Amino acid sequence: MVITRSSRLAAALLILGLLVAFGVLATQCGGGDDGDAVATTTSSTTTSTTSATSTTTITTTTLPNGPFAPLTGLYADADSPLFEQAAIVVKISNNSTAQRNGNWRGIDQADVVIEERIESEATRFAVVFHSQLPEAVGPIRSGRTSDLGLLTNLGKPILVYSGANNSVTGQLRSIQSDDLVKLVVDRGTNVDLVRDTDYNRPDNLFSNLVEIEEKYRDDSGTALPLFEYRSAALDERTVGAANEGVTVKGADTVSFVWDEGNGYVRVQNAAVHTTEDETSLVFDNIIVLEVVYTPSTFAPGSVDAQTLGTGTINLLIGGKRYEGTWSRESLTDPYTFLDSDGDPLRLDPGQTWMTLVPSGSYDFTVDAEISALVADLDE
């Protein structure tokens, strides 16, 4: 199996690469200016006088100047509709039925995936789409009270979900009344959300996000960034430790494994996680956000991730690990990541997977068998 990324993102990166080449040539010919879409930095290190180790580094890489797509940090044309378009959050199953079916659609095209625990250590995905809108996404499942904290800092997104119990429905309708989200829920009419009869309920519900965006454009807002990204102007970062990946244990054992030249490959229960069309899930940034889970007040048996306050953060980027703290003061605030010196920890431009993990459920090791599984993908 060959690792493939979504064709639209690959095209965007190809264009970015061509712009880099053009920018370098223009600079050599004396034609560069501040309006270039990208800039290339050279390696340098700043050493602290109070520490035995370097505190910041500028790596040799290509980073964009603005404007930036809000949920990837990638360059976007100033006239792009992205700057007026809402984020679309889709609740996608990760239960045993979905794993047996392997009928995940569209996840590989997400800007951001947030993996949250729901009950009995099982997880579900809140998948954030913006730069790319797949025509088939799913299997779509229910909303949970944790979603209240995951939706409200996106600038009135559209939430696509299968439904919820009465208490959770009341909470979601409340934030819709506060103009913080637009709800699109299954009403059993095969409008907006459609059942694929090739699969059994409940993991057979899908949606076309191109149609959703067009239909609910006037009822939603403009996407806001969740995180800070490195750019040509903001390219410094604390020195990271070499690291192959992370393993998270819950109802499933999940590893994110660094693969040079591709990114972080998601492996679940000793199998590379792929979509229905066998596209491997590969992301540029992995955020391991340590949170406290508390019993849900509105959904007995469920748990809620507490995403306000502060806690431990680990970023996996480019085969290195960066440790620090995360903070978020209000539901409408983005996340702030700081290193041990209080300096910002910024993501690399690209797609991001954020896993919300309780203390003690993860470690930064990868079994040899899992590493070999990922290595085989390149052959």
Image (spheres, rainbow, N blue to C red):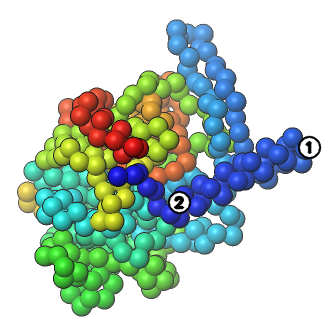
Q: Quadrant of the C terminus?
A: top left
How many C-alpha atoms fall within 10 Å of the one at disc 2: few (<14), some, or many (≥20)? some
Provide the secondary structure element on which disc 2 rests.
Answer: helix
Estimate the x, y position of residue 145 in percent, counting from the top left.
Answer: 23, 61
For this rendering, which residue is in front, 4 or 324? 4
Q: CA distance from mark 2 to mark 1?
A: 31 Å
Determine the residue positioned at 30% across, 35% down. 372
Q: Pick whichever of labels 2 and 1 is earlier in the sequence.
A: 2
Q: Is residue 189 above or below residue 205?
A: below
For this rendering, which residue is in front, 175 or 281? 281
Residue 42 visible = yes
Determine the residue positioned at 70% across, 35% down. 41
For this rendering, which residue is in front, 180 or 371? 371
Horizontal side, residue 176 vs residue 271: left or right: right
Q: Amino acid at mark 2?
A: Leu
Estimate the x, y position of residue 160 in percent, counting from the top left.
Answer: 32, 73
Q: Amino acid at mark 1?
A: Gly
For this rendering, which residue is in front, 202 or 302? 202
Residue 65 visible = no
Q: Mark 1 = which residue?
A: 30
Q: Mark 2 = which residue?
A: 9
Residue 205 lies in quadrant? bottom left
Horizontal side, residue 324 vs residue 66: left or right: left
For this orientation, the residue located farthest to the front is: 379
Determine the residue positioned at 35% across, 52% down. 1
Q: Is residue 229 above or below residue 188?
A: above
How many C-alpha atoms fall within 10 Å of the one at disc 1: few (<14), some, or many (≥20)? few
Estimate the x, y position of residue 289 in percent, counting from the top left.
Answer: 33, 41
Estimate the x, y position of residue 212 in percent, counting from the top left.
Answer: 41, 80
